Amino acid sequence: MHTGKYGYDEYSKIPQNRPLEVISQLSNKDMMALNKYMMDRVGYILQLIQKAEYTKLHYILDKEKYFGGDWDRPDIEKIEKDTEDLMLIEFSRHKDIEN
């Protein structure tokens, strides 16, 4: 939605007859607002997990089921492998520093 060849903010400069898929559907301002919205919510969920506030976490996650359930499932295996790879790199750096 935001990665088109032509920016939504420059709509008047887009050559005629360009396919819609090459035009960003969100302005930079809208994209920044969307990023902020998501970062705030993800940050809050992580804070609830860290503080073990499971009643609030359950409430938030349970409420979300009413806003669509046909999303792609997250690729947990890939994220877990990427995390393990990064941890191995970090741990090997610490070993190198200690030696």
Image: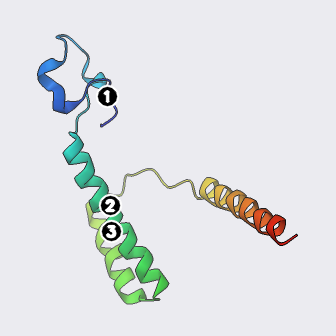
- Tell me the residue at 26%/31% (across/down): 24
Task: Measure how far apart labels 1 and 3 are at the Cα level.
Answer: 26 Å
Left or right: 94, with 18 as reference point: right
- Image side of residue 91 versus residue 42, left or right: right
Q: Which residue is mark 3?
A: 41
Q: Which residue is mark 2?
A: 38
Asked if the residue under mark 3 is in contact with the one under mark 1, i.e. CB atoms within 8 Å, the reply is no
The quadrant of the rendering that contains the N terminus is top left
Relative image position of residue 41 (x, y in whole percent)? 33, 68
Residue at numbered disc 1: 4
> Please, what is the three-letter code of the amino acid marked with disc 2?
Met
Q: Position of residue 50 (x, y in %)?
A: 48, 83
The amino acid on which the numbered mark 3 sits, given as a three-letter code, is Arg
Whole-percent x, y for residue 69 in the image = 35, 58
Dividing the picture into quarters, in which one does residue 67 lie?
bottom left
Tell me the number on the disc at residue 22: none
Q: Residue at x 38, y 81 (%)?
A: 58
* Spatial CA span between label 2 and label 3: 5 Å
- Secondary structure category for the residue under label 1: loop
Q: Quadrant of residue 14?
A: top left
Q: Quadrant of the C terminus?
A: bottom right
The type of residue carrying mark 1 is Gly
Classify mark 1: residues with Cα within 10 Å, few (<14), some (14-19) or many (20+): some
Dot 2 alpha-carbon crowd within 10 angstroms: few under 14, some 14 to 19, many 20 or more: few
Q: Which structural element holds mark 2?
A: helix
First along the sequence among labels 1 and 3: 1
Q: Are marks 2 and 3 in contact (CB under 8 Å)?
A: yes
Q: Is residue 67 above or below residue 32?
A: below
Residue 29 x, y percent position in the rendering? 20, 46
Residue under the image location 83 percent in, 72 percent down: 98
Depicted 28 relative to depicted 78: above or below: above
Mark found first going from the N terminus, 1 or 2: 1
